[in-house]
């Protein structure tokens, strides 16, 4: 957005609702969060909230999409060092990480409205990570694995570290542990990932 240009009031209100929804979902989980609780936080009636988001599912998808927009890097510009920076950035915003993690955990249940979002998101993230690894290491990493074999491991490390950090932030250095994982990926000859 150009400097000096104000956002239209509707966009500001939508952004305010998304922030409130993040907070409510982080506190209560998706199933425990209500449109009424979100509306109350932003000083709206539930009917007023429905003007911006016609269903709870629409609000949930908008929250997830907004979270991904905050983390967005232009297509094709991810690098390993930027992934490390993303982990450091996440360590500064526990509420967003908590909301994402809670929704991710809930989304594995049948019929959860976030399941299609996370399924598609993980497919895209794995492909993106494989491209990052290929750009860094070529067709084989030092341990002999392909980028496609290591990409799901990177996702698992990032998400698993988030859960551990959320449970015990004093004991788990999320950025430090991820840097250690990146060092493991660059292991010298004779050291293996498998």
Image (spheres, rainbow, N blue to C red):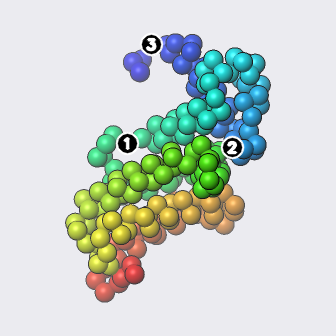
Residue at (39% x, 57% y) in the render: 126
Say which of marks 2 and 1 sits in front. 2
Residue 138 lies in quadrant:
bottom left
Q: Which residue is mark 1?
A: 73
Q: Is residue 161 above or below residue 44?
A: below
Query: How crowded is the residue under tag 1: few (<14 C-alpha within 10 Å), some, or many (20+)?
Result: few
Asked which secondary structure carries label 3, the reply is loop
Residue at (55% x, 33% y) in the render: 62
Q: Is residue 27 visible?
A: no
How many numbered marks appear? 3
Q: From mark 3 to mark 1, how far is it between C-alphas? A: 23 Å
Which residue is outermost to the front? 111
Residue 133 lies in quadrant:
bottom left
Asked which secondary structure carries label 2, the reply is helix
Residue at (57% x, 13% y) in the render: 9
Residue 173 lies in quadrant:
bottom right
Query: How crowded is the residue under tag 2: few (<14 C-alpha within 10 Å), some, or many (20+)?
Result: many
Dot 2 or dot 3, earlier in sequence = 3
Q: Is residue 44 left or right of residue 116?
A: right
């Amino acid at each position: 957005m150009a400097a000096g240009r104000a956002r239209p009031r509707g966009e500001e209100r939508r952004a305010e609702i998304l922030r409130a929804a993040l907070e409510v979902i982080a506190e209560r989980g998706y199933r425990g969060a209500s449109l009424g609780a979100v509306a109350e936080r932003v000083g709206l009636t539930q009917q007023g909230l429905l003007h911006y988001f016609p269903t709870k599912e629409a609000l949930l998808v908008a929250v997830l999409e907004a979270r991904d927009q905050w983390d967005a890097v232009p297509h094709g510009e991810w690098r390993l060092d930027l992934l490390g920076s993303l982990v450091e950035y996440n360590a500064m915003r526990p509420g967003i990480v908590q909301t994402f993690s809670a929704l991710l955990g809930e989304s594995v249940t049948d019929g959860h409205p976030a399941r299609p979002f996370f399924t598609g998101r993980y497919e895209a993230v794995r492909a993106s990570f494989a491209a990052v690894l290929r750009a860094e290491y070529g067709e084989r990493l030092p341990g002999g694995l392909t980028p496609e074999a290591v990409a799901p491991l990177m996702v698992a490390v990032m998400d698993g570290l988030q859960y551990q950090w959320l449970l015990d932030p004093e004991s788990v250095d999320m950025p430090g542990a991820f840097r250690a994982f990146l060092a493991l990926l660059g292991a010298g000859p004779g050291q293996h990932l498998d």
